[in-house]
Image: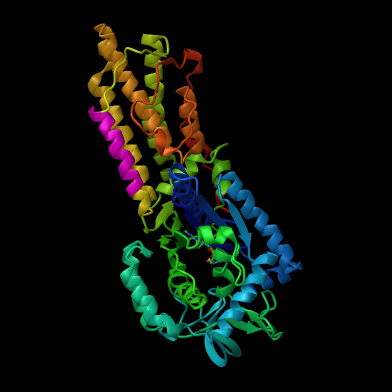
Amino acid sequence: MQEKFYLTTAIDYVNGAPHIGHAYEKILSDVIIRHKRQLTDKAYMLTGTDEHGVKIQKTAAAKGITPKELCDENFSKFEQAWKELEISYDQIIRTTDEKHKKVVKQIFKKLLENGDIYKHSYTGLYCAGCESFLNPKDLTEDGLCPDHLKKPEEITEENYFFRLSKYKEKIAEYIKSNPDFIQPSIRVNEILNQLENIEDISVSRTKESVQWGIGVPDDITQTIYVWIDALSNYITAIGYDIENPSEQFNELWPANVHVIGKDIIKFHSIYWSAILMSLGLPLAKSIYAHGWITIDQSKMSKSIGNVIAPHDVLEAFNLEKPDAFRYYMASAALTGKDGNYSDDDFKEKVNADLANNIGNLLNRTLNMLVKYFDGEIKPEFVTDKNSKIAVLAQNTKTQIIECFNKFEVAEAANIIVSFADSVNKYVTDNAPWTLAKEEKMQECGSVLYNVLEAMRHIAIMLYPYCPNIAQDILTQLNENIDFKYDNLVWGGLKPNKITEKEKIKPVFLRLDSEFATDKKKG
Ligand code: MSP
């Protein structure tokens, strides 16, 4: 039986267009899910958009359109961006979907019946940026929201509250006994500390303050706000229903990983865990919190004017395919660390790894195969699965699987590149051109075989990052296989005429520095 793998991303707010921070998360997630699909047929990726809330309501009002019109307009920008980046999600949920709204109401009702939601009059410090009340202990010394650096507003309202405090010990216990739950593990203590001070949270707002949202069942004066609506997407999308959960839900839940940014880890590890516990559902197996992407080392912000859309990068560098950008973003930050985008780094990194290292290796080797053997892999070329290079290929495969098990996407990319480095060194050390000159043709052919077989391995391992380049490598090798890891068995490349002079093409062209323009600064 193949193991299932259910991955979710955060659902993006649609009060603007997607930027490369949103893209970073979706690319990381897509690389992980494509890798998992290489191992199992049951890998499923969910992404989506978070469409309710006061910000949408206000932005729409300012534009003179309805909130739904604004959501539709921006949702299509996200959809288009993910298409352009070849994000291969299986499903994209919108929190304005009827099915979602219906099940969120059921969930709210169930929590109420369980005694975990109660009505309470409350005066609190509300941050519009976070769309939530803040705990005074979490404010900066100047009394500002630590994320938005704005003074929260004091608001008194009668709201529904969720009994988060009831679940405090149970969640702490769960985190401690499941070391894989919060990743990277450096975040565990931060969450345990937050848990100690956790209080019940407001989960609704009055209709006067928020109209754009799902109504509280049987109470026309209140709107569900905001995390119960947003977080529930992970189960409503796949057919959760209190009475009658779908087969798909039973198969996929619990999620194997929620991929999210480090700013929303509290909501996922504490709020969401408590909601699931109240519903009697198992918790996700892990939550992977990635770092943030800065631009030229500064925080991306509309006021600085440095917000970059993924499309702008592709356009500025004249890229028809997203591979280079995907590769760069997926390697931009080591697990959980922040990363940075800069035009110069982007060019340098993809030129070095994709053009010089991997692309040239293939090109040179195919040219030698044409020159010495008329483009043919001959039956007399020998390879040994116990040879150094074959063993290295197998070890590389194992290391990559291990990396992905820990969501080390950038680390896995580095391992592929260092394998390509070793293969380049193998070519230099074994100098097939000298072997040809000395007429040691069988030895020369065997060296070329090993390099091309290594390239076949590289194509499969690179596929999650660069699906088009990976396909081009296989096409250049005249290989008609899929990207499953079952194909990563040394010796898979069979004797055959695989190429001729005219067919050899670079799989990745160096980025020309002139392409970088100011166009990107949106
Ligand atoms: N709607 C909530 C998430 C609800 S999940 C049930 C939200 N939306 S968001 O649009 O603000 O952010 C969506 C995701 O993008 C989050 O995981 C967030 O961390 C991530 N990023 C937003 N800006 C980012 C960067 N600059 N860099 C990396 N990721 C960033 O939060």
Q: Which residues are magenta?
A: 386-402
Residue sitting at x 52%, y 88%? 124
Q: Quadrant of residue 166?
A: bottom left
**Residue 400 belongs to the span the image colors magenta:** yes
519 or 137, nearer to the observer: 137
Can see residue 467? yes
Residue 250, given in percent of the width and then of the height, sits at 53, 61
The structure's colour scheme is rainbow
Residue 510, given in percent of the width and then of the height, sits at 46, 32
With 415 as the anchor, is 156 left or right in this view? right
193 or 485, nearer to the observer: 485
Q: Quadrant of residue 426?
A: top left
Residue occupying the far front of the picture: 1
Residue 396, given in percent of the width and then of the height, sits at 31, 39
409 or 485, nearer to the observer: 485
Residue sitting at x 58%, y 42%? 315
Q: Magenta span: helix, strand or loop, mainly?
A: helix
**Residue 6 belongs to the span the image colors magenta:** no
